[in-house]
Amino acid sequence: MSRGIIFFSLLAKEFILKWRNHDDFERKSISHEGLHRGLSRIFLEHWSVLKSYHQSDKSRANSQWCMPASGLFKLNCDAAVHSKHSVIVVVARDWRGNWVLAHTENKSTNIQVQAQAEALRWSVCLASNKNLQKVLIRR
């Protein structure tokens, strides 16, 4: 399965969970048109950031994932910065290369260092929340 399909599947899942929580906790429902507009908006936001990110740094697109030592979990995190916001991504795999988790989130910063720091902070929080004991975090 391509990384693009996985990434956009995660975006859709995140949006649907937020929509469901909004409906459950605020007792406000959203129309099908609102759902469609919201999904389209987040896809376009993330796509524009990813597109500009890949155009500016072609060498990163060719990098390859390396497995961590036996018993370790490896969390890869990154941030893509656009003119008005950024997108941070965290992906965790075990020492066998199996997916453990993957998350994306929009941040309201367009400062590269701040977005990267937020991606690292979020990686630590996710590792703690998932009770991952031995981790290697890479940016």
Image: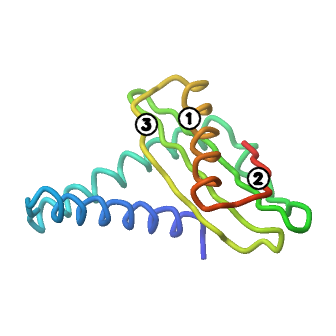
The residue nearer to you, when weighing 68 against 48, is 68
As drawn, the label of residue 62 is 2
Q: Is residue 41 above or below residue 70?
A: above
Q: CA distance from mark 1 to mark 2?
A: 24 Å
Q: Residue at x 57, y 56 (%)?
A: 129
Single out the mark in the foreground, 1 or 2. Answer: 1
Q: CA distance from mark 3 to mark 2?
A: 26 Å
Residue 33 appears at what percent x and percent y? 11, 63
Look at the picture and state if 32 lies above or below 48. below
1 and 2 marks in contact (CB < 8 Å): no
Please, what secondary structure does the residue beneath circle 1 have?
A: helix
Which quarter of the picture shows residue 79? top right
* Of pointers 3 and 2, the one earlier in the residue sequence: 2
CB under 8 Å between callouts 3 and 1? yes
Label 1: which residue? 118
Three-letter code, disc 2: Asn
Residue shown at 56% from the left, 49% from the top: 89
Residue 136 in the image: state x and y as whole percent.
Answer: 80, 51
Which residue carries the number 3 mark?
A: 107
Look at the picture and state if 92 lies above or below 57.
Answer: below
Q: Tell me: residue 116, above or below residue 2.
A: above
Look at the numbered disc 2 and give the secondary structure of its residue: loop
Q: What count of labels does the image hold?
A: 3
Q: Residues within 10 Å of mark 2 (few under 14, many from 20)?
A: few
**In the rendering, at what x and y percent does residue 29 appear?**
9, 63
Cα distance in 3D space between marks 3 and 1: 9 Å
Quadrant holding the N terminus: bottom right
